[in-house]
Image: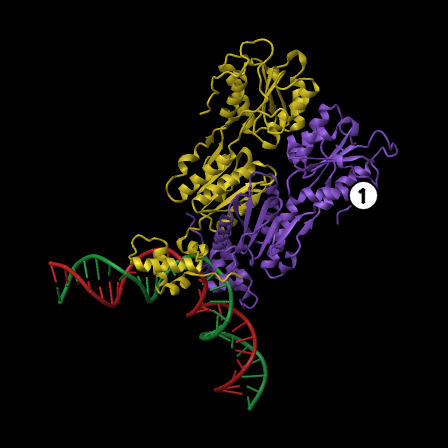
Chain colours: A purple, B yellow, C green, D red
Amino acid sequence: MNKSVGIKDVAAAAGVSVTTVSHVLNDVVYARVGVETRERVHEAAQRLGYGPNRLAQALRTQRSGMIGFISEEIATTPHAGRIILGAEETARARGYNLMIINSTSTSSQDSRESDVADLLDRQVDGILYATMYHRKLAVPKNLVGLPAVLVDSEDISHTVSSVIPDEIGGARSAVQTLIDAGHTRIGMLNNTDDVPATHSRLRAFKDTLANAGLPFHEELVQSEHSEVPGGYQAALRLLKPQSRPTAVFCYNDRMAMGAYRAAGELGLRIPDDISFVGFDNQQLIAENLYPALTTVALPHYEMGAWATENLIDAIEGKTDLHLFAAHPTALPCPMVLRDSVGSPKHKDASSRAAPDSPTHANT
Amino acid sequence: MNKSVGIKDVAAAAGVSVTTVSHVLNDVVYARVGVETRERVHEAAQRLGYGPNRLAQALRTQRSGMIGFISEEIATTPHAGRIILGAEETARARGYNLMIINSTSTSSQDSRESDVADLLDRQVDGILYATMYHRKLAVPKNLVGLPAVLVDSEDISHTVSSVIPDEIGGARSAVQTLIDAGHTRIGMLNNTDDVPATHSRLRAFKDTLANAGLPFHEELVQSEHSEVPGGYQAALRLLKPQSRPTAVFCYNDRMAMGAYRAAGELGLRIPDDISFVGFDNQQLIAENLYPALTTVALPHYEMGAWATENLIDAIEGKTDLHLFAAHPTALPCPMVLRDSVGSPKHKDASSRAAPDSPTHANT
DNA sequence: GGACGTGGGAGACCAATGAACAAGTCGGTT
DNA sequence: AACCGACTTGTTCATTGGTCTCCCACGTCC
C-alpha cells in the first residue's frame, strides 16, 4: 500500500551506502563521516520522508521498543483508562510504544500465560500487567524473569515488582479531613470483600481516630457490598437517629452515592447535618453528586507512569527491578476537596470554618 | 533475557532444514513433506516451546499483523474502554494485535500526522482512529490511502470509511418508549454544542412526535451545556408547574442526573409524577440513579468490533473500504429499560401497564 | 533412458546494524 | 624524493529470524 521509502532509497538519493546513511541518521559515535556528506544524507532523508522501519531495526538490534500491556477488563472500569494513559504517555516520551492485550479476571492461568507468550512472540521489551482493582495476584509463570511491573496489584510470591496506591495514607487523610473539620463522632461505610483495600482502609480509620484521641465505636462501622445499593443499606443502619455520627468515611464513591440517598430520605442535609468523604475520585460520581463529593483520588495515571518509567529503566539497564520486587511501591492518594464536608453543628461549636491545620500528609 | 528458541533450533532438533520447518509449521500448501518428518518437526517445536518471531515474520512477509489504534483522550471517557475492548477482542480473534497511541482532541494537525507516521514506521497493517464522541473530523493527510477506519466520527471529506452510532434511530426509540407508555406531553433537554448528536436527537424527537400525531411545543425543549449542572438548570425551566410535561427525553445521562435533582427539589416523584429517558447508558450513572435510568446505549463495543472486522477484511483484500467511505455505517443504539419510565397520571388513564406494542426499530 | 513424482535443501531476500577493512590524503622522516 | 604511518571517510560483508522461490537427488514407470 505505502511504497515505504527505505534506507537504501535514501542511500541512492544521497549517493552513499546504506551503512553511511545508518551511521549519520543514528549519530553513531565512532562513525567518521564528513560534514558535507552528513548534510546530503539528512537532506535526502528529509526530502524522501524517510522513517526507519522499526521492525527491521528491532530484528537487528534485538530491541523492539515495544512494551506489552496486559489489562484485566479494560472496559469495565473507567480507571483503566488513566493507567493506560499514564503508561502510554511516558512510554512515548521515551520512544516506546504500547501493545495492548485484554484479559479477564476470570480467565484461566493458561490463558494468562498465553497472553504473555503472545507478547513475547512480538518481541516486546517488557511487560506491564494491570489489574482493575488493587489485589494480590498469582502472576503467570512465564512472566517471572523478564522485565515486568504489576500495576495496582501485588505478586503473591513477591518475585515481580509492583506499584500500588497507598491505601493507608489515603484513608488516613480522608479521616483526618473529617477530624480537622471538627468531627468527633465519625462513622465508616466499609466493603465486605476480602481485598487489601477493605482491611487497609479500616485499619487507617481506627489508627487515625486513635491518633486524634477519639474513641472507636464498633457500631459506627457498617459493611455492605461496595456498590451504590450497599452504600444505601449500610448508611440506613449507620444513620439511625439514636447513634448517628456527624461524619462518614465511605469505602468508595459509589457507596457514598448510596449514602447520599439514605441521608436525603432521612431528611439530613449535606454537609450541614452530615459530612461525607469518599474514596476513588470517580469523576462521574464525585463531581456530579450534589453537593460534590470530597474524596480521595487513586493515583492511576501516576501508577501507570511510574510502572512504565521503571520498566524502561530496567530494560535499558539503568535499574534492577529485583530491588523493588520484595515490597510494592505505594504511591500517594491525594485528597480532592469538594463540598461534602462541613463542621458538626452540635457539641464542639469551637471550629466553624475549616481549620487551617494541614491535612495529614501520607509520605 | 529470554534465550528465545528460533526456527533453526527446531530445525536442528528435528534434523531438517529451516525451510522444512517453516513449511510444516505454516502448513504451506505446495510444500511436500513426508508425514513422518512433519511429526518430527511438530514434536520438536512443541518440546522446545517454539513460537515464531513475529518481527522477522513481518519483515519478510510485509505484513505485521499489527493494527494501530489512535484514540483521543483515552482516559477522559469511560466509553473509550469499550471501543478498545471491541477492537482488541476481534483483532485478537483474527490473529492481530493492537498498538495504542493516545492523542488529544486539541492536538495540532501536525501532531496527529506524526501519530500516524509513528504507527507507519512500526509497519502497522492498518489504522483505527477513534474519537471520544461522535463528531466530524479532518483526518490527518497521511491517513488517506491506507487501510483505516474512523470510529465514532466522520471524515469531513468522506475519503476514509467510518462507523458511528445511529443517533436518529436511538433517539426515536427513546421517544417512542415514552409515547408507548402513554405520554402525550413530552419535553426534551438538549445540548447546546454544535455536534451531530445535538441536531440528530432533536430531529428524531420532532419526527417521532409527528409520527405519533403529537404536537410539538417549542417551549418544551430546553438546552444547556450537556453536563449535570446544565441538566439541572434546563430541567428547572422545563418543569415549571404551568407548562410541565409528563415525560422528558434527555440528551444524555448526565443531563438526566441533573434533571433528577431538579425533579426532587420540585417534589416530583420518578416515575410516578415524571418519566425520564436518557442517552449514552453510562453505567455508573444510569444504573445507580434512583430510580435506575431507562436510557439508550451507544454501541461502543460494536463500533470497535465492526471497525476492526472491516479493517482486517480490507487488509486481507476481502473488502474494499472505499465502498464504505462515502457514507458512514450507523450501528443501532439499543434501548436499555430500567425504572425511570412510567405512565402519566392524568389525562389518558387508558394505558397503565406498559403496552406490548414493540418499540420502533431503528433500521 | 528420459519423463515424472516425491521429499527436502540452498540461498536470496526483507530493512536495518555494526565490526572490520579499504581508499585517499597528509605530515614527517631519512 | 621516496617511504611510512596515521587519519579521514566511507564501504563491504555478515547478521537478525523467518519466508519463499527455485533446484536437486533419488526412485519409479513406461
Image location (x, y in percent) of residue B27: 34, 53
Q: Is residue A223 left or right of residue A100?
A: right
- From the viewer's side, name the closer residue of A338 and A50: A338
Q: Vertical placement of B360 versus A137: above or below?
A: above
Image location (x, y in percent) of residue A266: 73, 24
Q: Residue at x 43, y 61 (%)?
A: B6
Q: Is residue A13 visible?
A: yes
Q: Please give the chain letter of the residue carrying mark 1.
A: A
Q: Is residue B206 left or right of residue B192?
A: left
Q: In this figure, which residue is indicated by the disc labeled 1?
A: A210
Q: Vertical placement of B170 versus C24: above or below?
A: above
Kind of residue at badge 1: Ala
- From the viewer's side, name the closer residue of A71 and B314: A71
Residue projecting furthest to the right: A350
Q: Residue at x 49, y 15 (%)?
A: B211
Image location (x, y in percent) of residue B262: 68, 21
SS at circle 1:
helix
Q: Vertical placement of A31 versus B259: above or below?
A: below
- From the viewer's side, name the closer residue of B363 and B33: B33
Q: Residues within 10 Å of mark 1 (few under 14, many from 20)?
A: few
Q: Residue at x 36, y 59 (%)?
A: B41
Q: Quadrant of residue A131?
A: top right
Q: Is residue B157 visible?
A: no
Image location (x, y in percent) of residue C1: 13, 67
Q: Is residue A331 left or right of residue B83?
A: right
Q: Is residue A349 left or right of residue A201?
A: right
